[in-house]
Image (cartoon, rainbow, N blue to C red):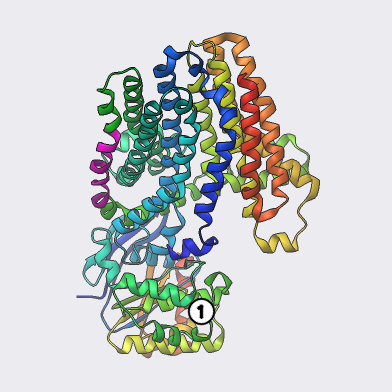
C-alpha cells in the first residue's frame, strides 16, 4: 500500500474523487433531462427510478468486474509477490480494499446524479436508490473476486474443459475462463441488483416489502465475501502458472503472424505507410496493456444498447445519451496511451508529428465504434430507422469529438488523463443533454 | 531428503518440448550451477521450481514440499530471483526489503543490503535504480530470512565486477551455512568459481551432471562444448 500511496501525491485519490464528484454535481442539471425526464410525470416515479437504477447498477457491476480482474488476476502486484510466501487471502483483501477506495467516487457521483429524485419527488426515494447503488457496489466487489478467483480454478479443471473448448474460439482454453468471467459477474451480480432496483420501485410505490429486496445485495455481500479467503488461498499462486501457460500458448501459436495479431490491426493496410506505423503501434500497445478500455468499449456499447432496448418512445434518446457517455468514457484510452509513453522515448525520439496524431486518431475512432453500433442495432430493431438514426448521429458527433479531446489532452504527456477527465465529462454532459432533448 | 527434488519433470508448450523428463536431486548444503545454451530449458526448469509454471508431468519439491500442491509451504523454504525480477518501483530498496522481511516473518535487512553492496543507495526509490541494482535488490530480498533454498535465474547478469565478486562471496557464505543454491547462467566461469556441482542442460535434457572439482574450469568449458555439440549432432 505504501508503494501505491507514494506513486501519487498524498491524498491524490481522495482529491481526484472529490473533483469527480464536484464535476458530476455541476453536470446534474444536464443529466436531469437525460435520465430523469420521467420525473415530469408524478405517476412514473417508481418505474422511472427503477429503470435509471438498473442502468446505474449494471454500470457499477461492469466496471468493478473489470477492475477486480486486473487487481486479482493479471495485475502489477502479482509479478512482485508471486515468488514470496504471501498469504493469498491477505493479497486479495488488500486488493479488494484498494479497489473499493479508488472507486468510492463512483457511488458518491451517482448519488449526486440521482439528486433530482430527492429535490423533485421524495428524499425517501432518493435514499432507497442510494442504498440500492451501495448494495450493487458492496456485492460486486466480493462477487467479482469470487468469480475471478474461481476462474483460475476453472481454467485448469478437466470438468470445465469441454465448455471452455466450446467457447474459446482461437484463444487458449485457460484464457476462455478469464474472458467470460466479467460476463458471469455481470449476469450473477446483475440479477441481484436488478431485483434491488425493483425493490426501490416497490418502496416508491408504497410497498414496504421493497426494502427486503433492497437489502438483498447487502445481505449477500458478506456471505459471498466469506468465500474469498479460501478461494484466494487455493488459487492465487496457481494464477501465475495459468497466466504463464496462456502467454506461452499465445507465443507458440503455429502461425507467428497470428500470435502477433491484435484487434483491428488489419485495418492499417488502407493507411499511408507512415500513419499505418503509428496506428499499428497504438493498436498493439492498447490491446496488450490497456485491453480493459478495448473490451470495456464493447461492454459500454452493450449497456448503451440496453438503455435503448425499450418500446418507450424516449428510448432512442436515452440510448443516444448513453452512447455519448460511454464514447467519452472509453475515449480516455487515447490520453492514457500518451501517458504510457516512456519518458526516455519522449525525450529522445521525435513524436512522429502529424503521422502519429493521425495514427492514434485512426485507432481510437475504430475502438470507439464498439460503443456506438450495439445501440444503433438495438434502436433499429425497437424503433426503426428514425431511432437508429438518432443514435448513429450521436455517435458520429461524439466519436470524433472524444478523439479530438484525447489527442489534445495527449499533448500534455503524462498529465493527459487528468486533463481529459474533466474536459470529457463536460463535453459528454452537454452533448448527452442535447441529444436527449 | 533433498533440498531440491525434480522427478521425471516434463514441460511442453503445445508441440514444443521445453523440458524433457529431467531427474535431479540436489542435497542441502550444496551450490549447483545450471548451464546450457539459449533455449536449453534452464529458465523453464527454474520457473517450475519457483512455482511460476506447473510441470506437464512429474513433481518438483523444495525441502519435501510439492511446489504445485503446497505452494505456500514451498515458498517459505525458497528464495527466488526470476530472470526479470520485479520490485515495487515506488519503494526504496530498504523499504522493499523491510516489506519482504515482513512477509517472510523476519530477516536482517542491513546485512542483506551490505552483502549486495546496496548500502549507499538503500534509501533511493527503486524506480531510479539501474538493471544491475534492481537485480541486487532482488537477490537481497531472496536471501532475507535465510530460506534454506535459493534459486537464481541469471542472477549475476548485469552486475559490475566488484558487485559480482561480493555477491559470489555472499552466496558462498550462504551455502557454507548449510543452505542450498541453484544458479543458472550462461557463463561457465561463474559456475567454475562458485559451484560445487554443475548440471548441463541441452534441448531440455540433462546432458552432464558433474562435480566441478573433478573437472576444473577448463574441463568444464570443454565438456560443455562437447556435450552441446553431441546433442546437436543427434
Say if A6 sits above or below B199 in the image.
Answer: above
Residue lying at 38% horizontally and 43% vertically, measured from the top left: A174
Camera sees residue A98: yes
Residue at the spot of label 1: B123
Which of A14/A246 is in front?
Answer: A14
Residue lying at 37% horizontally and 90% vertically, measured from the top left: B213
The chain holding disc 1 is B
Residue found farthest to the left? B1
How many residues crowd mark 1 within 10 Å: few (<14), some (14–19), many (20+)? few
Camera sees residue B203: no
Magenta-tinted stretch:
A216-231
Residue lying at 55% horizontally and 69% vertically, measured from the top left: B127
| Percent of width and height locating residue A369 | 61, 29
Which of A203/B46 is in front?
Answer: A203
The magenta stretch spans residue A217: yes
Residue lying at 42% horizontally and 27% vertically, measured from the top left: A53
Q: From the image, which quarter does the N terminus of chain A lie in?
A: bottom left
Left/right placement of residue A115 relative to residue B54 reads right
Say if A244 sits above or below A220 in the image.
Answer: below
Amino acid at each position: 500500500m505504501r508503494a501505491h500511496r507514494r506513486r501519487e501525491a498524498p491524498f491524490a485519490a481522495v482529491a481526484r474523487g472529490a473533483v469527480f464528484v464536484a464535476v458530476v454535481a455541476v453536470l446534474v442539471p444536464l443529466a436531469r433531462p437525460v435520465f430523469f425526464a420521467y420525473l415530469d410525470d408524478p405517476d412514473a416515479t417508481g418505474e422511472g427510478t427503477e429503470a435509471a437504477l438498473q442502468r446505474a447498477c449494471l454500470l457499477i457491476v461492469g466496471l468493478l468486474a473489470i477492475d477486480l480482474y486486473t487487481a486479482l488476476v493479471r495485475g502489477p502486484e502479482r509479478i512482485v509477490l508471486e515468488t514470496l510466501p504471501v498469504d493469498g487471502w491477505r493479497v486479495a483483501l488488500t486488493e479488494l480494499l484498494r479497489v473499493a477506495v479508488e472507486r468510492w467516487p463512483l457511488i458518491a457521483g451517482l448519488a449526486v446524479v440521482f439528486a433530482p429524485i430527492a429535490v423533485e419527488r421524495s428524499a425517501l426515494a432518493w435514499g432507497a436508490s442510494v442504498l440500492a447503488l451501495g448494495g450493487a457496489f458492496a456485492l460486486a466487489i466480493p462477487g467479482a473476486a469470487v468469480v475471478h478467483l474461481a476462474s483460475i480454478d476453472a481454467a485448469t479443471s478437466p470438468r470445465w474443459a469441454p465448455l471452455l473448448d466450446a467457447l474459446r474460439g482461437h484463444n487458449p482454453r485457460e484464457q476462455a475462463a478469464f474472458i467470460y468471467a466479467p460476463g458471469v459477474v455481470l449476469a450473477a451480480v446483475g440479477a441481484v441488483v436488478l431485483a434491488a432496483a425493483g425493490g426501490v420501485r416497490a418502496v416508491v410505490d408504497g410497498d414496504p416489502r421493497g426494502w427486503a429486496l433492497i437489502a438483498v445485495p447487502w445481505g449477500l455481500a458478506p456471505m459471498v465475501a466469506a468465500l474469498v479467503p479460501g478461494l484466494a488461498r487455493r488459487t492465487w499462486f496457481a494464477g501465475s502458472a495459468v497466466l504463464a501457460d496462456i502467454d506461452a500458448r499465445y507465443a507458440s501459436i503455429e502461425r507467428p503472424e497470428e500470435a502477433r495479431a491484435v484487434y483491428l490491426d488489419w485495418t492499417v493496410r488502407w493507411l499511408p505507410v507512415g500513419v499505418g506505423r503509428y496506428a499499428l503501434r497504438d493498436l498493439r500497445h492498447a490491446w496488450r496493456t490497456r485491453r480493459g478500455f478495448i473490451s470495456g468499449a464493447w461492454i459500454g456499447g452493450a449497456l448503451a444498447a440496453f438503455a435503448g432496448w425499450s418500446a418507450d418512445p424516449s428510448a432512442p434518446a436515452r440510448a443516444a445519451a448513453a452512447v455519448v457517455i460511454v464514447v467519452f468514457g472509453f475515449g480516455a484510452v487515447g490520453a492514457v496511451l500518451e501517458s504510457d509513453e516512456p519518458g526516455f522515448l519522449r525525450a529522445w525520439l521525435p513524436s512522429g508529428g502529424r503521422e502519429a496524431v493521425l495514427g492514434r486518431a485512426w485507432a481510437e475512432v475504430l475502438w470507439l465504434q464498439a460503443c456506438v453500433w450495439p445501440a444503433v442495432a438495438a434502436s433499429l430493431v425497437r424503433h426503426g430507422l428514425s431511432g437508429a438514426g438518432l443514435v448513429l448521429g450521436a455517435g458520429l458527433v461524439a466519436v470524433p469529438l472524444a478523439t479530438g479531446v484525447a489527442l489534445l489532452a495527449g499533448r500534455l504527456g503524462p498529465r493527459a488523463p487528468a486533463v481529459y477527465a474533466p474536459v470529457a465529462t463536460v463535453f459528454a454532459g452537454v452533448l448527452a443533454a442535447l441529444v436527449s432533448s | 531428503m533433498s533440498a531440491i527434488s525434480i522427478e521425471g519433470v516434463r514441460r511442453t508448450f503445445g508441440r514444443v518440448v521445453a523440458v524433457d523428463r529431467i531427474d535431479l536431486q540436489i542435497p542441502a548444503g550444496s551450490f549447483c550451477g545450471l548451464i546450457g545454451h539459449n533455449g536449453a530449458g534452464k529458465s523453464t526448469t527454474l520457473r517450475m521450481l519457483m512455482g511460476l509454471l506447473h510441470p506437464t508431468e512429474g513433481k518438483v519439491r523444495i525441502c519435501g514440499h510439492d511446489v504445485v500442491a503446497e505452494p505456500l509451504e514451498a515458498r517459505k523454504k525458497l528464495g527466488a530471483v526470476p530472470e526479470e525480477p520485479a520490485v515495487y518501483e515506488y519503494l526504496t530498496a530498504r523499504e522493499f526489503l523491510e516489506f519482504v522481511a515482513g512477509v517472510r516473518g523476519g530477516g536482517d535487512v542491513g546485512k542483506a543490503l551490505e552483502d549486495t553492496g546496496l548500502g549507499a543507495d538503500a534509501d533511493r526509490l527503486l524506480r531510479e535504480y539501474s538493471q544491475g541494482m534492481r537485480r541486487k535488490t532482488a537477490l537481497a530480498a531472496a536471501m532475507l530470512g535465510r530460506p534454506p533454498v535459493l534459486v537464481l535465474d541469471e542472477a549475476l547478469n548485469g552486475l559490475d565486477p566488484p558487485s559480482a565478486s561480493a555477491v559470489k562471496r555472499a552466496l558462498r557464505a550462504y551455502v557454507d551455512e548449510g543452505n542450498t543454491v541453484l544458479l543458472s547462467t550462461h557463463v561457465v566461469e561463474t559456475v567454475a568459481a562458485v559451484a560445487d556441482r554443475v548440471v548441463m542442460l541441452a534441448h531440455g535434457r540433462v546432458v552432464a551432471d558433474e562435480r566441478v572439482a573433478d573437472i576444473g574450469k577448463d574441463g568444464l568449458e570443454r565438456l560443455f562444448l562437447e556435450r552441446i555439440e553431441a546433442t546437436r549432432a543427434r
